[in-house]
Image: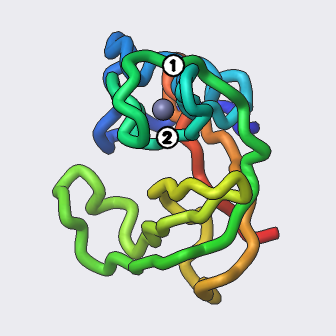
Amino acid sequence: MSTYPETVYSAPLPDLADPLTAPHWAAAREGRLAVQRCASCGALRWLPAVICPECLTTGGDWVDLAGTGTVWSYAVYHRAMNPQFKDRVPYAVAMIELDEGIRMVGTLAEVDGVEIGQRVHATYEAVTADVTLVRWVRD
Ligand SMILES: [Zn+2]
């Protein structure tokens, strides 16, 4: 896990006060990849949701995943889609198929040499004193 740099992180930050996603961000600060799990049918879900899309039960709990998976798809951005990311181009956004079976969108730590099917693992980048982002690096 890296510590946040002295320079100001200028890209958008998550809303840590949102109760739907707060457990994920709290886990990331501790170097864990946490997602929701339905208390009724056990389905894992990302993005977090109030209702399980599999069985329509409300609520659920949070579980830690291994933080490992494969690149299912990706795109390399050479122009920032949001002006707040202009200092980060080029950057790669990927759909990661986690080993537990669900998919999660995230940024890759490296742009060059990315391939579909490549093994990756989560890394945790503290970008402010309160916010730690999950990024993906090649195994
Ligand atoms: Zn369910």
Q: Earlier in the sequence, mark 2 or mark 1?
A: 2
State which quadrant residue 68 falls in: bottom right
Quadrant the N terminus occupies: top right
Mark 1 neighbour class, 10 Å CA radius: few under 14, some 14 to 19, many 20 or more: many
**Element marked by disc 2:** strand
Amino acid at the residue labelled 2: Arg
Please report the residue visible at 50 percent of the width from the left and 54 percent of the height from the top: 104
Please tell me whether residue 139 is drawn above or below residue 103 in the rendered image: below
Q: Quickly name the residue at label 2.
A: 45
Residue 5 shows in this picture: no
**CB under 8 Å between callouts 2 and 1?**
yes
| Image position, residue 41 (x, y; %) | 56, 32
State which quadrant residue 113 falls in: bottom right
Q: Is residue 70 left or right of residue 52?
A: right
| Image position, residue 130 (x, y; %) | 51, 17
State which quadrant residue 52 falls in: top left
Please report the residue visible at 36 percent of the width from the left and 40 percent of the height from the top: 53
Please report the residue visible at 43 percent of the width from the left and 67 percent of the height from the top: 93
Please report the residue visible at 18 percent of the width from the left and 57 percent of the height from the top: 82
Q: Is residue 72 left or right of residue 19?
A: right
Residue 66 shows in this picture: yes
Q: Quickly name the residue at label 1.
A: 60
Mark 1 Cβ inside 8 Å of ligand 1: yes
| Image position, residue 59 (x, y; %) | 43, 16
Amino acid at the residue labelled 1: Gly
Mark 2 neighbour class, 10 Å CA radius: few under 14, some 14 to 19, many 20 or more: many
> Residue 46 or 83: which is nearer the viewer?
46
Q: Is residue 32 left or right of residue 54?
A: right
Q: Give the mark count.
A: 2
Please tell me whether residue 74 is drawn above or below residue 40 in the rendered image: below
**Element marked by disc 1:** loop
